[in-house]
Amino acid sequence: MRQSPNFFRAAAAVILSAVIWSFAAVPAFAWPERTVRFIVPLGPGSGVDITARLLGDTLSKKWGQAVVIENRPGGDGIIAITGFISANDDHVLLFTPTGAFSSHPYTQEKMPYDPAALTPITRVTTTIIGFAVPVSTGVNSMKELLDKVRAEPGKLNWASATAANEFAFQGYLKENKLDMVKVPYRDTVSAINDLGEGRIQMYVGAYAIMRPQMQAGKVKVLAVTNRDRAKGAPDIPTAAQAGFPKLQFDGLVGIFGPAKMPVAVRAQIAADARQALADPAIAEKLTATGQNISPGTAAEFAAAQKAQTDQIDGVAKLLGLKRAQ
Protein backbone atom coordinates (compact mmCIF):
# COMPACT_ATOMS: atom_id res chain seq x y z
CA MET A 1 0.00 0.00 0.00
CA ARG A 2 1.36 3.41 -0.93
CA GLN A 3 2.21 5.63 2.05
CA SER A 4 1.41 9.32 2.20
CA PRO A 5 4.15 12.01 2.28
CA ASN A 6 3.08 12.86 5.81
CA PHE A 7 3.92 9.32 6.89
CA PHE A 8 7.50 9.61 5.61
CA ARG A 9 7.95 13.01 7.22
CA ALA A 10 6.79 11.63 10.55
CA ALA A 11 9.10 8.61 10.26
CA ALA A 12 12.08 10.83 9.45
CA ALA A 13 11.34 12.99 12.48
CA VAL A 14 11.29 9.91 14.72
CA ILE A 15 14.64 8.68 13.35
CA LEU A 16 16.26 12.12 13.69
CA SER A 17 15.04 12.38 17.26
CA ALA A 18 16.49 8.97 18.09
CA VAL A 19 19.87 9.93 16.63
CA ILE A 20 19.94 13.18 18.61
CA TRP A 21 19.12 11.37 21.83
CA SER A 22 21.77 8.70 21.16
CA PHE A 23 24.47 11.40 20.89
CA ALA A 24 23.13 13.14 23.98
CA ALA A 25 23.50 9.89 25.92
CA VAL A 26 27.29 9.90 25.27
CA PRO A 27 29.02 12.34 27.66
CA ALA A 28 31.03 15.07 25.97
CA PHE A 29 34.81 14.87 26.40
CA ALA A 30 35.72 17.33 29.14
CA TRP A 31 38.90 17.39 31.19
CA PRO A 32 39.60 18.78 33.72
CA GLU A 33 36.28 18.87 35.49
CA ARG A 34 37.77 20.05 38.79
CA THR A 35 41.01 21.11 40.49
CA VAL A 36 44.17 19.46 39.15
CA ARG A 37 47.01 18.57 41.54
CA PHE A 38 50.68 18.36 40.57
CA ILE A 39 52.57 16.24 43.12
CA VAL A 40 56.24 17.32 43.16
CA PRO A 41 58.92 15.23 44.94
CA LEU A 42 61.10 18.27 45.70
CA GLY A 43 60.60 21.21 48.03
CA PRO A 44 59.45 24.75 47.21
CA GLY A 45 62.03 26.79 45.31
CA SER A 46 63.64 23.84 43.51
CA GLY A 47 63.91 24.04 39.73
CA VAL A 48 61.23 21.38 39.27
CA ASP A 49 58.93 23.15 41.73
CA ILE A 50 59.34 26.47 39.91
CA THR A 51 58.63 24.75 36.58
CA ALA A 52 55.49 23.11 37.95
CA ARG A 53 54.20 26.43 39.29
CA LEU A 54 54.90 28.39 36.09
CA LEU A 55 53.31 25.72 33.93
CA GLY A 56 50.46 25.25 36.40
CA ASP A 57 49.57 28.96 36.31
CA THR A 58 49.35 28.97 32.52
CA LEU A 59 47.44 25.70 32.31
CA SER A 60 44.99 26.83 34.99
CA LYS A 61 43.97 29.77 32.79
CA LYS A 62 43.61 27.54 29.76
CA TRP A 63 41.69 24.82 31.57
CA GLY A 64 39.48 27.07 33.64
CA GLN A 65 40.32 25.03 36.74
CA ALA A 66 42.80 25.59 39.56
CA VAL A 67 46.15 23.77 39.39
CA VAL A 68 47.54 23.14 42.88
CA ILE A 69 51.20 22.29 43.49
CA GLU A 70 51.66 19.75 46.28
CA ASN A 71 55.27 19.38 47.46
CA ARG A 72 56.11 15.99 48.95
CA PRO A 73 59.90 15.91 49.33
CA GLY A 74 61.85 13.11 50.96
CA GLY A 75 62.59 9.43 50.52
CA ASP A 76 64.40 9.98 47.19
CA GLY A 77 61.03 10.68 45.58
CA ILE A 78 59.26 7.63 47.00
CA ILE A 79 56.94 9.67 49.24
CA ALA A 80 55.65 11.62 46.25
CA ILE A 81 55.41 8.59 43.96
CA THR A 82 53.48 6.40 46.41
CA GLY A 83 51.20 9.33 47.25
CA PHE A 84 50.46 9.84 43.57
CA ILE A 85 49.77 6.15 42.95
CA SER A 86 47.49 5.80 45.99
CA ALA A 87 45.42 8.79 44.79
CA ASN A 88 44.48 6.84 41.63
CA ASP A 89 42.83 9.95 40.22
CA ASP A 90 43.19 11.35 36.70
CA HIS A 91 43.17 14.87 38.18
CA VAL A 92 46.29 14.07 40.26
CA LEU A 93 49.51 14.11 38.22
CA LEU A 94 53.13 13.42 39.15
CA PHE A 95 55.47 16.26 38.08
CA THR A 96 58.93 14.84 38.57
CA PRO A 97 62.51 14.18 37.50
CA THR A 98 62.86 10.57 36.34
CA GLY A 99 66.39 9.90 37.58
CA ALA A 100 65.28 8.89 41.07
CA PHE A 101 62.91 6.11 40.09
CA SER A 102 65.23 4.90 37.33
CA SER A 103 67.63 4.04 40.15
CA HIS A 104 65.12 2.85 42.78
CA PRO A 105 65.43 -0.82 41.78
CA TYR A 106 69.05 -0.62 42.99
CA THR A 107 68.67 1.64 46.02
CA GLN A 108 65.73 -0.23 47.56
CA GLU A 109 65.77 -3.77 48.91
CA LYS A 110 62.16 -4.17 47.79
CA MET A 111 60.33 -1.91 45.37
CA PRO A 112 57.69 0.06 47.32
CA TYR A 113 55.60 0.67 44.19
CA ASP A 114 54.92 -0.76 40.74
CA PRO A 115 56.62 1.32 38.00
CA ALA A 116 53.83 0.26 35.62
CA ALA A 117 51.51 2.54 37.62
CA LEU A 118 53.34 5.56 36.17
CA THR A 119 52.11 6.46 32.68
CA PRO A 120 54.24 9.01 30.76
CA ILE A 121 52.25 12.02 29.56
CA THR A 122 54.83 14.56 28.40
CA ARG A 123 58.45 15.53 28.82
CA VAL A 124 58.73 19.13 30.05
CA THR A 125 62.37 20.11 30.66
CA THR A 126 65.81 18.72 31.29
CA THR A 127 67.51 19.86 34.47
CA ILE A 128 71.09 20.91 33.79
CA ILE A 129 73.50 18.67 35.71
CA GLY A 130 77.09 19.81 36.07
CA PHE A 131 80.51 18.63 37.23
CA ALA A 132 82.05 21.27 39.47
CA VAL A 133 85.39 21.65 41.25
CA PRO A 134 86.81 24.26 43.65
CA VAL A 135 88.64 27.05 41.81
CA SER A 136 91.48 26.51 44.29
CA THR A 137 92.33 23.14 42.67
CA GLY A 138 93.45 24.89 39.49
CA VAL A 139 91.54 22.28 37.44
CA ASN A 140 89.99 23.74 34.28
CA SER A 141 88.61 20.76 32.34
CA MET A 142 87.19 17.26 32.79
CA LYS A 143 90.40 15.82 31.36
CA GLU A 144 92.49 17.68 33.93
CA LEU A 145 90.20 16.49 36.72
CA LEU A 146 90.32 12.83 35.71
CA ASP A 147 94.08 12.99 35.08
CA LYS A 148 94.44 14.33 38.64
CA VAL A 149 92.26 11.50 40.00
CA ARG A 150 94.44 8.98 38.16
CA ALA A 151 97.63 10.57 39.49
CA GLU A 152 96.34 10.70 43.09
CA PRO A 153 94.33 7.49 43.67
CA GLY A 154 92.11 7.57 46.74
CA LYS A 155 93.14 11.11 47.72
CA LEU A 156 90.31 13.12 46.14
CA ASN A 157 86.73 13.30 47.43
CA TRP A 158 83.47 13.79 45.57
CA ALA A 159 79.76 14.12 46.33
CA SER A 160 76.49 13.91 44.45
CA ALA A 161 72.87 14.91 44.94
CA THR A 162 70.91 12.00 43.46
CA ALA A 163 71.37 8.27 43.04
CA ALA A 164 71.16 8.46 39.24
CA ASN A 165 74.01 10.97 38.97
CA GLU A 166 75.95 8.99 41.54
CA PHE A 167 75.53 5.74 39.60
CA ALA A 168 76.61 7.31 36.32
CA PHE A 169 79.84 8.69 37.82
CA GLN A 170 80.58 5.60 39.93
CA GLY A 171 80.19 3.46 36.83
CA TYR A 172 82.69 5.62 34.96
CA LEU A 173 85.22 5.42 37.82
CA LYS A 174 84.83 1.65 38.00
CA GLU A 175 85.12 1.11 34.26
CA ASN A 176 88.25 3.26 34.06
CA LYS A 177 89.84 1.89 37.25
CA LEU A 178 89.84 5.29 38.94
CA ASP A 179 89.82 5.63 42.73
CA MET A 180 87.93 8.62 44.17
CA VAL A 181 86.24 8.66 47.59
CA LYS A 182 82.52 9.45 47.77
CA VAL A 183 81.44 11.60 50.72
CA PRO A 184 77.76 11.26 51.73
CA TYR A 185 75.74 14.41 52.43
CA ARG A 186 72.22 14.81 53.74
CA ASP A 187 71.66 18.06 51.89
CA THR A 188 73.09 19.67 48.78
CA VAL A 189 73.72 23.06 50.42
CA SER A 190 76.32 21.59 52.76
CA ALA A 191 78.00 19.77 49.88
CA ILE A 192 78.21 22.89 47.73
CA ASN A 193 79.53 24.97 50.65
CA ASP A 194 82.23 22.36 51.28
CA LEU A 195 83.06 22.31 47.58
CA GLY A 196 83.53 26.08 47.59
CA GLU A 197 85.87 25.79 50.57
CA GLY A 198 87.85 22.96 48.97
CA ARG A 199 86.88 20.31 51.54
CA ILE A 200 85.66 18.11 48.67
CA GLN A 201 87.22 18.16 45.22
CA MET A 202 84.27 17.45 42.91
CA TYR A 203 80.48 17.64 42.97
CA VAL A 204 77.99 16.41 40.39
CA GLY A 205 74.48 17.80 40.65
CA ALA A 206 72.09 20.51 39.52
CA TYR A 207 73.82 23.45 37.88
CA ALA A 208 71.35 25.88 39.53
CA ILE A 209 72.70 24.88 42.96
CA MET A 210 76.30 25.44 41.87
CA ARG A 211 75.72 28.80 40.24
CA PRO A 212 75.89 31.04 43.35
CA GLN A 213 79.29 29.59 44.30
CA MET A 214 80.40 29.86 40.68
CA GLN A 215 79.37 33.53 40.55
CA ALA A 216 81.24 34.10 43.81
CA GLY A 217 84.41 32.85 42.12
CA LYS A 218 84.77 29.79 44.36
CA VAL A 219 83.61 27.02 42.03
CA LYS A 220 84.26 26.17 38.38
CA VAL A 221 81.76 24.09 36.38
CA LEU A 222 83.77 21.90 34.00
CA ALA A 223 80.99 20.31 31.95
CA VAL A 224 77.32 19.39 31.99
CA THR A 225 76.08 15.82 31.74
CA ASN A 226 73.22 16.77 29.43
CA ARG A 227 72.96 15.98 25.74
CA ASP A 228 72.67 19.71 25.01
CA ARG A 229 74.52 22.69 26.47
CA ALA A 230 72.75 24.77 29.09
CA LYS A 231 70.95 27.62 27.38
CA GLY A 232 71.68 29.75 30.44
CA ALA A 233 75.42 28.89 30.34
CA PRO A 234 76.32 28.21 26.70
CA ASP A 235 80.08 28.44 27.33
CA ILE A 236 80.11 25.24 29.41
CA PRO A 237 80.67 22.13 27.23
CA THR A 238 78.69 18.93 27.51
CA ALA A 239 80.53 15.88 28.84
CA ALA A 240 80.47 14.42 25.32
CA GLN A 241 81.96 17.60 23.86
CA ALA A 242 84.63 17.50 26.56
CA GLY A 243 85.59 14.01 25.35
CA PHE A 244 83.66 11.89 27.86
CA PRO A 245 80.43 10.67 26.20
CA LYS A 246 79.91 7.94 28.80
CA LEU A 247 79.32 10.66 31.39
CA GLN A 248 76.29 11.91 29.46
CA PHE A 249 73.09 11.76 31.51
CA ASP A 250 70.03 13.91 30.90
CA GLY A 251 68.08 15.28 33.88
CA LEU A 252 64.65 14.39 32.46
CA VAL A 253 61.64 16.12 34.01
CA GLY A 254 58.09 15.35 32.97
CA ILE A 255 54.50 14.65 33.88
CA PHE A 256 53.03 11.23 34.63
CA GLY A 257 49.42 10.17 35.01
CA PRO A 258 47.72 7.07 36.45
CA ALA A 259 47.86 3.85 34.43
CA LYS A 260 44.21 3.99 33.34
CA MET A 261 44.17 7.64 32.27
CA PRO A 262 42.43 7.90 28.87
CA VAL A 263 44.74 8.38 25.90
CA ALA A 264 42.75 11.45 24.79
CA VAL A 265 43.32 13.17 28.15
CA ARG A 266 47.04 12.43 28.06
CA ALA A 267 47.28 13.81 24.55
CA GLN A 268 45.42 16.98 25.57
CA ILE A 269 47.71 17.60 28.57
CA ALA A 270 50.81 17.07 26.42
CA ALA A 271 49.57 19.44 23.72
CA ASP A 272 48.58 22.11 26.25
CA ALA A 273 51.94 21.83 28.03
CA ARG A 274 53.85 22.21 24.75
CA GLN A 275 51.81 25.31 23.91
CA ALA A 276 52.48 26.82 27.34
CA LEU A 277 56.23 26.12 27.13
CA ALA A 278 56.38 27.96 23.79
CA ASP A 279 55.76 31.23 25.67
CA PRO A 280 59.07 33.20 25.61
CA ALA A 281 58.39 34.61 29.09
CA ILE A 282 58.15 31.11 30.57
CA ALA A 283 61.21 29.98 28.61
CA GLU A 284 63.26 32.86 30.01
CA LYS A 285 62.26 32.10 33.60
CA LEU A 286 62.98 28.38 33.27
CA THR A 287 66.38 28.99 31.68
CA ALA A 288 67.22 31.12 34.71
CA THR A 289 66.51 28.13 36.99
CA GLY A 290 69.12 25.99 35.22
CA GLN A 291 66.86 24.06 32.88
CA ASN A 292 66.47 23.53 29.15
CA ILE A 293 62.94 23.44 27.80
CA SER A 294 62.43 20.07 26.14
CA PRO A 295 58.74 19.34 25.52
CA GLY A 296 57.92 15.98 24.00
CA THR A 297 55.07 13.61 23.31
CA ALA A 298 54.21 10.70 25.59
CA ALA A 299 56.06 8.34 23.22
CA GLU A 300 59.16 10.55 23.15
CA PHE A 301 59.12 10.88 26.92
CA ALA A 302 58.73 7.12 27.38
CA ALA A 303 61.62 6.45 24.97
CA ALA A 304 63.90 8.93 26.77
CA GLN A 305 63.00 7.40 30.13
CA LYS A 306 63.71 3.88 28.82
CA ALA A 307 67.11 4.99 27.54
CA GLN A 308 67.87 6.44 30.96
CA THR A 309 66.73 3.25 32.71
CA ASP A 310 68.83 1.11 30.36
CA GLN A 311 71.86 3.29 31.17
CA ILE A 312 71.29 2.82 34.91
CA ASP A 313 70.83 -0.93 34.43
CA GLY A 314 74.16 -1.10 32.60
CA VAL A 315 75.98 0.79 35.34
CA ALA A 316 74.35 -1.31 38.05
CA LYS A 317 75.53 -4.48 36.32
CA LEU A 318 79.05 -3.06 36.13
CA LEU A 319 78.93 -2.23 39.85
CA GLY A 320 77.56 -5.68 40.73
CA LEU A 321 74.26 -4.38 42.14
CA LYS A 322 71.22 -6.63 42.33
CA ARG A 323 67.82 -5.48 41.21
CA ALA A 324 65.08 -5.22 43.86
CA GLN A 325 62.12 -7.56 43.52
Image (cartoon, rainbow, N blue to C red):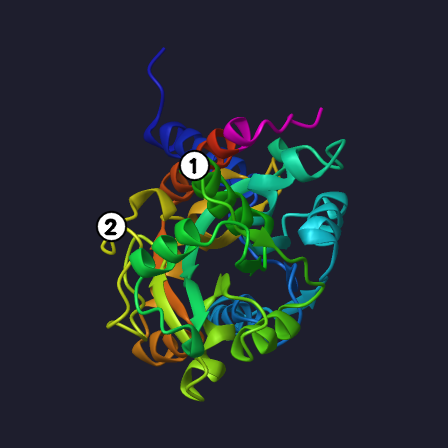
> For this view, does 161 lie left or right of residue 285?
right
Crowding near pointer 1: few (<14 within 10 Å), some, many (20+)? few
Which residue is pictured at 42% across the width and 81% down the height?
Answer: 214
Which quadrant is the N terminus positioned in? top left
Query: Magenta includes 5?
Result: no
Which quadrant is the C terminus positioned in? top right
2 and 1 marks in contact (CB < 8 Å): no
Residue 63: % across, % down: 51, 66
Q: Toward the viewer: 7 or 223? A: 223
- Residue 138 position by quadrant: bottom left
> For this view, does 99 lie left or right of residue 41?
left
Residue at the disc numbered 1: 16
* Helix, strand or loop status at disc 2: loop
Q: Which residues are magenta?
A: 316-325
Mark positioned earlier in the residue sequence (2 or 1): 1
The mark found on residue 243 in the picture is: 2
Can residue 250 be spotted in the picture?
A: no
Above or below for 151 versus 107: below
